[in-house]
Amino acid sequence: MGFMNLFRKKREEEPGDKFSLYNTFGCHERPEVNCPTFLVRNIHKDFENALKSYNIIVVYGESRQGKTWTIERYCPSQLRIGCEAIMEIKDLKIAMLHAVGLDVRKIDHSITEEYQESMDSVCRVGGEMLVAAGANSEKLKGYKETLSTSYETVDLSRNIDFYEALKINGIGKYFVFDNFHYLDPSVQQKFCTLLKEFNYHGIKIIIVGVWKDASKITALAPDLVNRCVHLDIGSWSDEELNEIVELGSKALNIEIAEDAVEIFKSCSANNIGIFKDFLQKYCQEFNISETVPSRQVLSDETKTQRVVNAIITEAYTPLRDRINNLAVPHRDRRDSKFLRLKIIIVVLRFIIEREPSESRRGIEFTTLRDNLQKLSLKWGEPEIAVSNLTQELGKLHEREENRQTGGNFIPLFYYDKTNKKLLILEPTIYAIKAYDSKLLQDIANDLEKNITGNPNEVQETFWNSIS
């Protein structure tokens, strides 16, 4: 009996399966089958129910919150299509056909016909002369005529053929359009006009995007109201983040100091992707690459600060550059009165001054308008017309940097016309603010130089006036 107790005690002290750090706290695109930190959330149950009830499903929300992981785990019968900024509607159709094993190819088809005529029929007089000379009057003359045509294996201009091809070859599968937000707005609009027919033909679609507006897709395709389901991936609660730490610590046989976890939670802005990045880099500071044989406590204030500095520094420069690209148009627009730039300054100030929970809900149109009017008044400029402001807000998500580089970018902001709110889509903004709001203040100050040349003269009184 004593031997058995010793045996049990030894087994309890030994860790179970071995896990790699990357599989535990890594931010890879697809979850491993045995990922120890995959947490079942309420949104997962909602998604499973949606798969049983709808042909059109829209999964939306902040980047790096688990949209792709949710679909990968609960929808194995998927045909993924990665959207790109350069794609047109024809490219999307071709990608759908390719996903079901149908390649759109151009086939050249030629028919050659031969004709023969006797020399007599060509020239009787000439024939008589040839006979007199001893030639055969029955000799034939040949002609060849070739007709060339070309066609595509699937005629994309005939939607009925396109739908039938997908219906027959994609039975029981969901076409998943990942990163739908990368597409040009006009392409998004054209694609959404096809959704009702997809639904009618039983072609299953999942659209994935980073917007926060539940009505975005139905706004582009009003016929889909009550015919599709919108699922908000949502932010992660502190309790869920704590559970991730607990699950990961158990898998790696470690213990992460509570003060480090609290700092990481504060700087991650409840974003699971950012939070796990903190945890992974913190473990690397202690040379943890996989499950360790004996329990190890990770606690070091210097290493904690070093990890935070590294992640925030990595995020700050590209965010600053993108804000500058968006705020200051590449083309000369002197008639714009720096409207877009002023909007970005006011938005940054709002984020700096308000709690993250408030700015996550979006900035009301009236709040934007009032603060912009104060800004114009401070600089001795006329009030901004409401129509001009509405028009400029509607263009913010069109991403000028995309048109300049042809790259894929997540919009920084999106104006929800239905609810009259400007939504902040980029999660690193909140992470940088939690770390040091002065970094965002510096970006705003630099933007002001485009208007005043020297922001120091008006900066303090202006900020006080709109706080």
Image (spheres, rainbow, N blue to C red):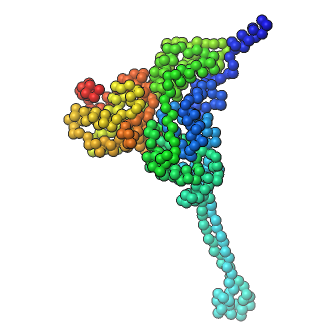
Residue 58 screen position, x and y as percent = 52, 41
- Residue 225 lies, with reference to residue 61, above or below; the image says below
Q: Residue at x 40, y 39 (%)?
A: 414
Residue in front for this viewpoint, 189 or 41: 41
Residue in front for this viewpoint, 438 or 328: 438
Residue in front for this viewpoint, 304 or 134: 304
Question: Which residue of the protein is positioned furthest toward the top in this rendering?
Answer: 2
Residue 144 appearing in the image: yes
- Residue 242 lies, with reference to residue 188, above or below; the image says above
In the image, taking residue 128 as reference, residue 302 lies left or right, namely: left
Q: Residue at x 62, y 25 (%)?
A: 36
Q: Quadrant of the C terminus?
A: top left
Tell me which corner region of the image, top left, top right, bottom left or bottom right, holds residue 130. Answer: bottom right
Residue 24 screen position, x and y as percent = 60, 24
Q: Residue at x 58, y 56 (%)?
A: 162
Q: Quadrant of the N terminus?
A: top right
Residue 247 screen position, x and y as percent = 60, 21
- Residue 201 lies, with reference to residue 431, above or below; the image says below
Instruction: Report the label total.
Output: 0
Tell me which corner region of the image, top left, top right, bottom left or bottom right, holds residue 296. Answer: top right
Q: Residue at x 50, y 27 (%)?
A: 236
In the image, taking residue 416 as reference, residue 299 lies left or right, namely: right
Residue in front for this viewpoint, 27 or 107: 27
Residue 281 appearing in the image: no
In the image, taking residue 122 as reference, residue 181 lies left or right, namely: left
